[in-house]
Image: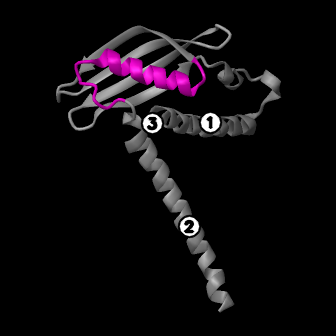
Amino acid sequence: MLRVRERRWPVVCVLLSGIGVLGLLWFNLLYYPGIGLDGIGGDNSGAALTGAAKAFAESESLFFDRLLDSDQLTKPDGGIVAWSTVALRTRDGQELRAWVALQWTRTWGWNRYACHLLADPRDRILFSESQLGIGSMNKVRYVLRRLWAEELRRFREVHRVLL
């Protein structure tokens, strides 16, 4: 009886890990990209970009200032890709820039394609070899921590949009 229970643990762990991975894939590919952009038509890319930028700024504890340069491209299949550089402000007034890119299709409506800070001060450590004597493994750990932080930021953004 004890041997049967011991053999179940690896199966249970693999099953739970698989469910977790499928949950993250569902969240990142199907749920998060369109949250908060429902009801905005394909002809109103400015409102969609502004909504995505405001939600991104709030999830990063920043303030939305304005859209700077925005443009859009209509694809042959009728889809639209829109992108913009966004001016954001920190609590102390420092100005940061962000990149927001969205895609619109008849089936899914507006979806986030990319939302991230440009020249993020936290990323400087990756571009200078002498910064704190950081080695390759430390850079890998840093990048993995930043990926996890980005995932948590997405959860915060969804939480704030839904409330």
Report how far apart the C-alphas of labels 1 and 3 lie in the structure.
Answer: 20 Å
The residue indicated by pointer 3 is: 162
Q: Secondary structure beneath disc 2?
A: helix
Residue found at x 46% / y 32%: 161
Q: Is residue 49 magenta?
A: yes
Q: Secondary structure beneath disc 1?
A: helix
Report how far apart the C-alphas of labels 1 and 2 lie in the structure.
Answer: 24 Å
The earlier-in-sequence mark between 1 and 3 is 1
Does residue 127 show up? no
**Residue mark closest to the camera, 3 vs 2:** 3
Quadrant for the N terminus, please: bottom right
Residue found at x 66% / y 88%: 3
Asked if residue 25 lies left or right of residue 89, the reply is left
**Residue mark closest to the camera, 1 vs 3:** 3
Give whichever of 120, 109 is nearer the camera: 109
Q: Which mark is residue 14?
A: 2
Where residue 12 sits: x, y (%)? 57, 71
Q: Which mark is residue 95?
A: none
Q: Amino acid at mark 1?
A: Ala
Q: Secondary structure beneath disc 3?
A: helix
Q: Which mark is residue 149?
A: 1
Give whichever of 67, 18 is nearer the camera: 67
* Residue span colored magenta: 37-62
Give whichever of 131, 21 is nearer the camera: 21
Asked if residue 111 lies left or right of residue 86, the reply is left
Image quarter of residue 147: top right
The earlier-in-sequence mark between 1 and 2 is 2
User: How many residues crowd mark 1 within 10 Å: few (<14), some (14–19), many (20+)?
Assistant: few
